[in-house]
Image: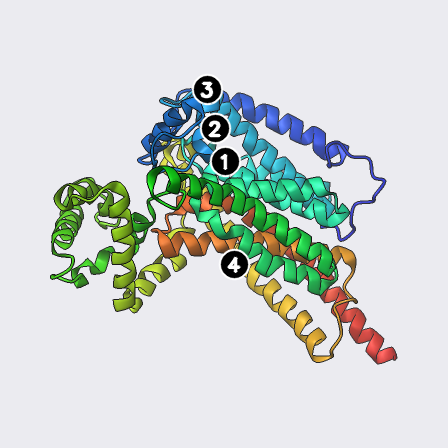
Amino acid sequence: MSNASPARNERTIAGLPPGVSFFYLFLFSAALIIYGIAWSNSMVIAADTPGYFETARDLADFKLDQLNDRPPGYPLLLLLTGASSHPTRRLFFTALLLHLVTIWMLTVVLHNMGLNGLWLKLFGSILIQPPYVQSCAMIMTENLAQFCLALSVACFILWLRNRRTIYLAITSSAIGYSALTRPTYQALSLVIVLSVLPLAGYLGCLNRREMLRAALSLVAVSAILVGGLSAFNYSRFGYFGITPLLGYNLSTRTVRFWDRLSDSEDRVVKDVLIKTRDSELISPGSSHTGLQSIYTARPEIIRLTGMSQIEASRYLVRMNLNLIMRAPLNYLQEVGCALGGSYWFPANSSLANMNSRIIQMIWSLLHFMIIGCFLATGLILSGALADSFLKARLTELDPSPLSSETKYQILAYCLAGTIVLYTMIISCAIDIGDPRFRLPTDCLILLMIFLAPMLWLRLVKNHWNETANRQTG
């Protein structure tokens, strides 16, 4: 693994060395042919897919006529690819192209960080495997969300390199649009502003004016997109938000202690919820967890209480927040089980597994090896970074001994890590933490794995140099 950064005058094709570019063109051409044939009639329609179809049909005249459960980010792609009511080949190949562009962009990031051709080819070869491509054949938001996140990371790193405003604008727009695709990312811009930008300032990669400029851009674009849609929904339908599902999502975290609901205040709703949950626990063919029973109970709650869709959503938010305050440890136990378990399990579909137990085992082993490497390298690198920053703090020195390339690698790693951790926390704290929710960040997890050894070696080399300088001084 090379420690050298790419030369400024190095000849590249779309940001990659010619050898890597030609390898990727061959790899991508093969992927388009193989997946196009193997998955010719295999688009996956999940339980949430009808909701995206409904929003896409509502967008047919490019305006929203009702309050939809699903925000318009992904349904707009369905509409543009003619898939507003059924899967189309145009949708599949568009999704596949988005995945291939994602691989190319993240490889450009790795190349900018100093990785050589062999490692870049290995990176792309892993991401072209079925477990990573399967989201292209799923009529769900994971593929588009992955593209938006990768685009934001790549353009942010490019902006740090040359300060071209267009890259910052694309980063801000990509993060904002990711929130319209998956509501999980509504606060992502703010989290990046509060974590990554201060780190960039501490490392000396950004001055105060540049930090303020980036913060305003990131927050403003997200506020315009998310806030604009929320304001529109409020003015037209009386609901401020981009989706009315927050109360239902939170219910998946409190389902095991619905029995704590007040008999006096929530009697009708409590009876419906417990009856539905207990029924799903023993129903043949169900998950036998009852975690999604709130969606089965939804029509009955609205019917018995006479509440509107919006009123039911607001009621469930208040109900669940009260439940969490009454039983915080039960809630934390639910979140902890997802954080430490289910979230990190394979999300392989029948497409990736090809209905073969042997292939499923192979992909599962590959998955756990990658997650194991991610956790191990993350712990080791976190220790090395903490040691480096703590020494600088105790000696009242700035981190200037670190080379500029090392600083950029730290920022790239921490930016990707921020998105990965943010996605994990929100997915497990507000929803069930299904492994599918992790798919948009799997490519960033692999990016971090490839960055970690090189960055660790740079930090160790810097430590040795400092030690040698002190001894000779």
Residue highlighted by disc 1: 144
Q: Is residue 263 above or below residue 287?
A: below
Q: CA distance from mark 4 to mark 2?
A: 34 Å
Of labels 3 and 4, the one closer to you: 3
**Foreground residue among 238 and 293:** 238
Sequence order check: which comes first, mark 2 or mark 3? 2
Q: CA distance from mark 3 to mark 4?
A: 37 Å
Secondary-structure class at tag 3: helix
Where is residue 23? Give x, y as percent.
68, 30
Is there a contact, CB below 8 Å, between mark 2 and mark 1?
yes
Residue highlighted by disc 4: 375
Sequence order check: which comes first, mark 4 or mark 1? 1
Is there a contact, CB below 8 Å, between mark 4 and mark 2?
no
**Callout 3: few (<14), some (14-19), or many (20+) C-alpha neighbours within 10 Å?**
some
The kind of residue tagged 3 is: Arg
The answer to whether one can see residue 379 in this image is yes
Secondary-structure class at tag 4: helix
Secondary-structure class at tag 2: helix
The kind of residue tagged 4 is: Leu
Q: Quadrant of residue 229?
A: top left
Q: Is residue 94 left or right of residue 426?
A: right
